[in-house]
Amino acid sequence: MKPTVHDIARSAGVSLATVDRVLNGRPGVRHVTRERVEGAISALGYVRDVAAANLAKSRTYSFVFILPMNDNPFMISLADEVRGAIGRSGAERTGIRVVDVPPFDPSALVGALEAVLVEKPAGIAFVAIDTPEVRDAVARLAGAGIAMVTLVSDLPDSARDHYAGIDNIAAGRTAASLMGRFLAGRSGTVAVLAGSMLVRDHRERLEGFSAVLQDTFPDVRILSVLEGRDDPELAEMLVADALRRHPEISGIYSLGAGNRGLIRAVQSREADRRPLVIAHELTAPTRAALTDGIIDAVLNQDAGHEVRSAIRVLKAKADGLPVITAQERIRIDIFLKDNLP
């Protein structure tokens, strides 16, 4: 049974009127009380059903998702989740369209944003690339009154309205803590495989990873970042070359995609000379590599939660309603061989 506003009021120990004020962003609620209500909303998994109200108003929301497309399994899963939302569009009163762009290509992303600006949809969700030209395009869309949510990789201090994704600095710090503990205090050399330093999520993961190793595991040395552009063939070549040139490598942190190539490069080494590997996103290749002991840990984010969150936020912006922060927080899941779902 879905939780109701009565359940929220009972859990938070407040009146229905207070719950209503929090849900609708009205004043007159103390900060501590608001936090208690939002905590109850998050714990109960309450999701506002605005579909019925919008049905009565005959309102349809037009949204565009701009997604980088190659054979990155996580981005494919993100697109699958958007297609699932399109399948529910009749019940949810949404009209959703997907625009594909090449990955790590600021000009292509700007072109897609400019093309969407002509359509004037109610909202746009996109995977950001942190460059001045992208920020300028976002400012133009905001000036036209179009709500925007960044997915997976953020564009902070820009005109976007919300970010639907994990805390990438925390993810990098988590990866470093796992790496340092897996190495059991031994000195070692760690290679880092990224997609591109143009995207903020990869830069922030590296920032968090480097900070923890430097502060807590100073005997672990990080090599220069390998930028594989989330391409499995390029990633395999870069990792294999790094392992040849640095046979002392004891760990690899893959903070982007291209993991099929990484897995092949690690598998080519003798079992007793394979480095520890920590990667991102639980996909078919990383799941199999976890099971086989090629990858030691995977940090995961829920693509479905991110898509649902983006749609909820864009609807809220279109309706002039507040965003419930606790409900939209995307968690970091850690998977080992032993706890695979």
Image (cartoon, rainbow, N blue to C red):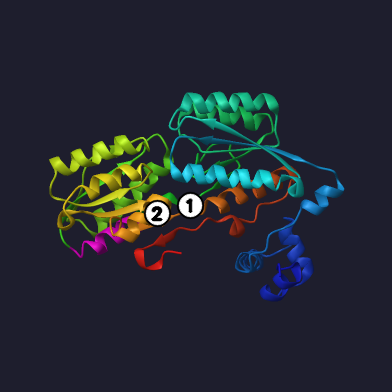
Report the predominant secondary structure element of the magenta stretch: helix
Q: Residue at x 34, y 44 (%)?
A: 260
Name the quarter where the N terminus is drawn.
Answer: bottom right
Residue at far right of view: 56
Sequence-earlier tag: 1 or 2: 1
Q: Magenta residues?
A: 174-185
Query: Which residue occupies the foreground of this view, 100 or 51?
Result: 100
Query: Which residue occupies the foreground of this view, 312 or 236?
Result: 236
Q: How many marks?
A: 2
Q: Position of residue 253 (x, y in %)?
A: 30, 50
Q: Residue at x 40, y 67 (%)?
A: 339
Q: Residue 171 got which mark?
A: 2
Q: Is residue 119 left or right of residue 220?
A: right
Q: Position of residue 108 (x, y in %)?
A: 50, 25
Q: Mark 2: few, some, or many residues within 10 Å (few <14, many ≥20)?
A: many
The reply to whether callout 1 and callout 2 are in contact (CB within 8 Å) is yes
Query: Which residue occupies the foreground of this view, 80 or 142?
Result: 80
Q: Residue at x 67, y 75 (%)?
A: 11
Q: Is residue 21 something one can see in this rendering? A: yes
Alpha carbon separation for disc pair 1 and 2 = 8 Å
Residue 333 in which image quadrant: bottom left
Q: Is residue 227 something one can see in this rendering? A: no
Q: Residue 210 got which mark?
A: none
Badge 1 is on which residue?
166
**In terms of secondary structure, where does tag 1 sit?**
loop
Q: Residue at x 14, y 44 (%)?
A: 246
Q: Is residue 311 left or right of residue 27?
A: left
